Each structure stands twice: as structure tokens, then as C-alpha cells.
Amino acid sequence: MPAVETPTGLVRRARKIDRTLAETYPEAGCELDFDDAFQLLVVTVLSAQTTDRRVNAVRPTLFAAYPDARAMAAADRSALEGIVGPLGFFRAKTESLLKLSAALVEDHGGEVPGRLDDLVKLPGVGRKTANVVLGNAFDVPGITVDTHFGRLARRLGWTSETDPVKVEHAIGALFPKRDWTMLSHRLIWHGRRCCHAKKPACGACPVARWCPAFGEGPTDPEAARALLKTQGPA
Ligand code: SF4
């Protein structure tokens, strides 16, 4: 990497990294299971402070009982708490789902709106959740700045911003809009599997040669390989 990088150099390097991640993780995608926009919205809200794997495990029971916003808005609170119980924070999560589904029924006829402005007005829905739903259920390109995305964008020297909205705009300027959703999946996959928060597997990282933070984790290939997480959804 040059000592001083031009804006064009940064765009080229960022896109090289994304192409390499695309080759490394051809299966990258949304790790939450869903059948429609309502399910995706609900499971994304539920995924806060737990793993996608746990959310996927409660999903069949949840949507068998409450297949749409009307059914969920009318849910018995304690029955709903029982289903989301394994995810932790069950009272708060139940409250979120009841408010969210009530707002969908009252303001959108029970349907999930396909616009960012409408989505972020729903209770408990921030830009991150809205972009997940837009990108994966509506094919509207969106950048999802979760903890992995922000950490990697900074380590890779794509931005020094820490505010998620500023990160979203800074990274959006480096890539064509059509790539935003898949870029988000790939960066998050890389963060979950290789570029860990505490000990990144630098010595086994496919984009190490373009990363200014190389060396933040072990650079010895064997030690680094032992840190890779390759099995199943994170
Ligand atoms: S070289 Fe290290 S810090 Fe950079 S992306 Fe790879 S794992 Fe992360």
C-alpha cells in the first residue's frame, strides 16, 4: 500500500478487496432464514444481542403461530414471550414485536413498506435493520453497517468514521450502488469468519496484502488458520 493513497487508489483497492472476498465467500448471503419481508423484518429485530443461529432455531415455531403482522399484533403476550424466550431479553423483544406488528397493521395495512423512510419510522427499526430488509426482501441496494462492517471498514482503511450513518455514506461512495447489498454480506462474513474483533486471523486472510491493519492478529499462517471459523452460520 502506498504511504499516501489517492481517492482513486482507495476505490481501486476497496474494489479489489471486495472481488477477492466474493471469490473467497461465493456462498455469502443473509444468514437469517426468512420466507418473506415480514419474516425478515421480525427475525432481524430479534437478532439483536443474540446469534443468527438461535434466531433461525425459533423461527419455525414463531411463524407457525403468527404468520403475518395481523396475527402477531393480536398475539397473547405470554405465549409470544415463551417462543422468543431462548433469545434472551424476552420481555423487551416481545414488546418490540407487538409494537412493530401493530404499527404495520395500523399504518401499512399489515404489509412491510419497501421504502427506507417508512421502515425507519417503525418502532424498533433503525437504518441497519431497514437496509437488511430493503436489500434482501425488496432488492433495493443497501449497506448494512453492523459491528463487523464498521470494524472491517476501519481496519481496511476505507474510512475512519465511527458513526454508522457516516460509515454507510463513506463506503457507499466507493462502490456502485448495485453492489451494496452483497458487499455488506461479504464484509460481515469475513468479519465473522476471519477478521475477528479480538484476534483477527491475519496470517490466513485472503485480503491481507491490501490491508493496512495486517499484523493486528497473528501473522503466522498456522496460528492464524486455527482462528478461522468455517463451520455453518455464525
Ligand atoms: S489482514 Fe488482518 S486485520 Fe486486515 S482484514 Fe485481514 S484479518 Fe482483518
Image (cartoon, rainbow, N blue to C red):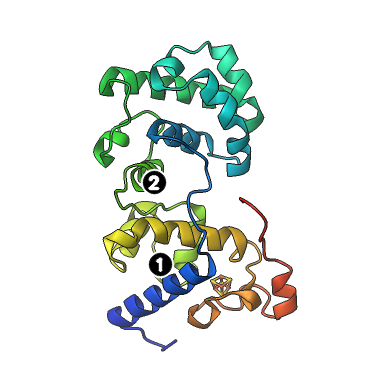
- Report the residue marked by disc 2: 136
Is the residue 113 above or below the residue 185 in the image?
above
- Structural crowding at the residue carrying mark 2, measured as other residues with C-alpha within 10 Å and reported as few (<14), some (14–19) or many (≥20): some
- Residue 171: horizontal and vertical position, in percent? 34, 64
Question: Which badge, 2 or 1, is on the more N-terminal residue?
Answer: 2
Please state the horizontal and vertical placement of residue 231, each as a whole percent of the image: 67, 56
Question: Which of these two is toward me, 20 or 168?
Answer: 20
Residue in view at x 52 percent, y 34 percent? 46
Figure label count: 2
Task: Give SS at disc 1.
Answer: loop
Task: Please give the name of the residue rendered at 43% of the width and 70% of the height, measured from the top-left corner.
Answer: 18
Q: Which of 104 and 36 is in front in this view?
A: 36
The quarter of the picture where residue 183 lies is bottom left
Q: Which mark is residue 195?
A: none
Q: In which quarter of the image is the N terminus?
A: bottom left
| Side of 112 where 156 appears, left or right | right
- Residue at 44%, 11% in the rendered image: 74
**Contact between labelled residues 1 and 2, with CB atoms less than 8 Å apart:** no
Three-letter residue code for mark 2: Asn
- How many neighbours does mark 1 have within 10 angstroms: few (below 14), some (14-19), or many (20 or more)? some
Secondary structure under the numbered disc 2 in the rendered image:
helix
Q: Taking the image as four quarters, which one is ligand 1 found in?
A: bottom right
Pointer 1 residue: 160
Spot occupied by residue 157 in the image (x, y as percentages of width and height): 43, 73
The answer to whether residue 13 is visible is yes
Disc 2 from disc 1: Cα separation: 27 Å
Q: In which quarter of the image is residue 100?
A: top left
Which mark's residue is nearer the viewer, 2 or 1?
Answer: 2
